Image (tube, grey):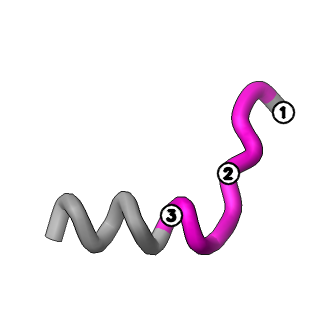
């Protein structure tokens, strides 16, 4: 794993994109 991608990180990204 290069980056510790967690559910929180994904939610943050989705929130920014949306």
Q: Is residue 15 left or right of residue 17?
A: right
List the residue tagged with mark 1: 1
Q: Is residue 8 left or right of residue 3?
A: left
Secondary structure beneath disc 2?
A: loop
Task: For the residues labelled 2 and 3, say whether their Cβ atoms are less than 8 Å apart.
Answer: yes
Seen in the picture, residue 2 relative to 16 is either above or below; the reply is above
Q: Where does the magenta region start and end?
A: 2-10
The mark found on residue 5 in the picture is 2
Q: What is the C-alpha distance between the residues marked 1 and 3?
A: 15 Å
Which residue is at the far top? 2
Q: Is residue 12 left or right of residue 16?
A: right
The residue that appears at 15% across and 71% down in the rendered structure is 18
Q: Quadrant of the N terminus?
A: top right
Task: For the residues labelled 1 and 3, say whether their Cβ atoms are less than 8 Å apart.
Answer: no
List the residue tagged with mark 3: 10
- Whichever of labels 1 and 3 marks the residue nearer the N terminus, that label is 1
């Amino acid at each position: 794993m290069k980056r510790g991608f967690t559910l929180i990180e994904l939610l943050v990204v989705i929130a920014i994109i949306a």
